Amino acid sequence: MTRRGLLIILSSPSGAGKSTLAKRLRAWDPEIRFSVSATTRAARPGEVDGQDYHFVDEDAFKRMVHDRQMLEHAHVFGNFYGSPLGPVEAAIEAGQDVLFDIDWQGAQQIQKSPLASSVLSVFLLPPSIIELRRRLESRGQDSAEVIAKRMNRSWDEISHWDGYNYVLVNDDLDATEEKLKTIVTAERLRASQQPGLVDHVRHLQSEFEGHE
Amino acid sequence: MTRRGLLIILSSPSGAGKSTLAKRLRAWDPEIRFSVSATTRAARPGEVDGQDYHFVDEDAFKRMVHDRQMLEHAHVFGNFYGSPLGPVEAAIEAGQDVLFDIDWQGAQQIQKSPLASSVLSVFLLPPSIIELRRRLESRGQDSAEVIAKRMNRSWDEISHWDGYNYVLVNDDLDATEEKLKTIVTAERLRASQQPGLVDHVRHLQSEFEGHE
């Protein structure tokens, strides 16, 4: 039976394991694809249009927002970023899951979009703030100021943990990965993701009426 | 982290594998308990009060309905049957899942009850009506008339397949069992089933504020 794809939202503060888990989820099932954002910022060397981003000009971007062709969008440091509805809708109709690595503001917008019924939203919490800070610090040579800024942004993200379908405390990457896979496997079975059920029941009905 | 228990509703037409799957679910996790119904009918030889049923008189039953102490109830052949709220609420608070083997009318009532947010509802469909009839016929020496009545009741049940969280076509018992276990495992992780998350976030907050 063909299923509808899921719109999988993965949010977390920076350093809570979101990117690693997104990668592992795709390694587990390469059919899951990342949503490609549209942006008005210029392409950087090596970035491929349609793969890293859809590079569009501001007029085109604003037209898409106006025409409700953006699932979510934000204005960051003078540039627009957003998730075009079209490709996600097409993927979902074709039974492909689309993974969104976005913050709570994007998640809230998508949960009010026309595709809301296919959303599976997961928020990752760190086991502790000390651990989160350790992970941010171990990344490289960032200054204390940069780390402090990231910690503030992380707290802003954490404070919006509520409103997600699932909230996992990522104290063990392997265990969290297993939970994520179980959740995705189960959510794919939701009645709302199985449009073929209508046909199956119709078939049962004609069988039943044929027999009586 | 302590979780809230799930109120697992399993519905299906007679012969679609509901009892077998309920048993397998409890064999997988004996902590899952069956909801014990209250009834006004007399105990049959061998039936134990509080185990097979809670045997109550009609006044007591009606008072419970009036006091909203019944999650769902029905009147069948002159007797009342219902699921008392109290024990289910206590089990759920203690982190125990409670399994309900009920029809679509009971399921609808529970989904409007105060415990609705903990409901996981699963409907089992037969692969075909021929297969369903075959399973009903293979049960014993029932007359054609009894089988026909059961088939009509089965169709009534099937026609209410919509409105369940999950609808599984039971064409392979082992595969359906796996799906059920995956669904239960995932649903236990829902944010709404994890009251301890609030404490965890509070802890993160005090840690964050202590550091700034």
Image: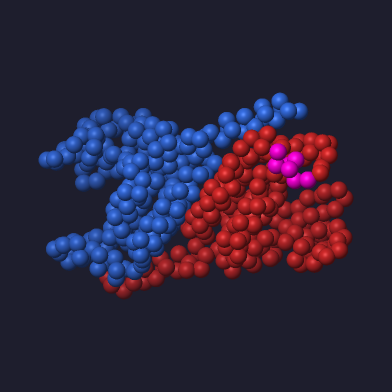
Chain colours: A red, B blue
Decide if residue B58 is on the left or right side of residue A56: left
> Is residue A92 in view?
no
**Residue at 76% in and 36% down:** A152
Indicate yes or no whether the magenta region holds residue B180.
no
**Residue at 30% in and 50% down:** B23
B203 relative to B105, above or below: above
- At which x and y percent is residue B44? 14, 41
Dividing the picture into quadrants, the one containing residue B211 is top right
- At which x and y percent is residue A210? 31, 74
Q: Nearer the viewer, residue A200 or B62?
A: A200
Dividing the picture into quadrants, the one containing residue B67 is top left
> Is residue A100 in view?
yes
Q: Nearer the viewer, residue A148 or A55?
A: A148
Looking at the figure, which quarter contains the C terminus of chain B?
Answer: top right
Indicate yes or no whether the magenta region holds residue A139.
yes
Among all residues in the image, which is located at the extreme left? B45
**Residue at 49% in and 55% down:** A186
Q: Which residues are magenta?
A: A134-140
- At which x and y percent is residue A129? 67, 34
**Residue at 27% in and 33% down:** B61
A51 relative to A153, above or below: below
Decide if residue A208 is on the left or right side of residue B143: right
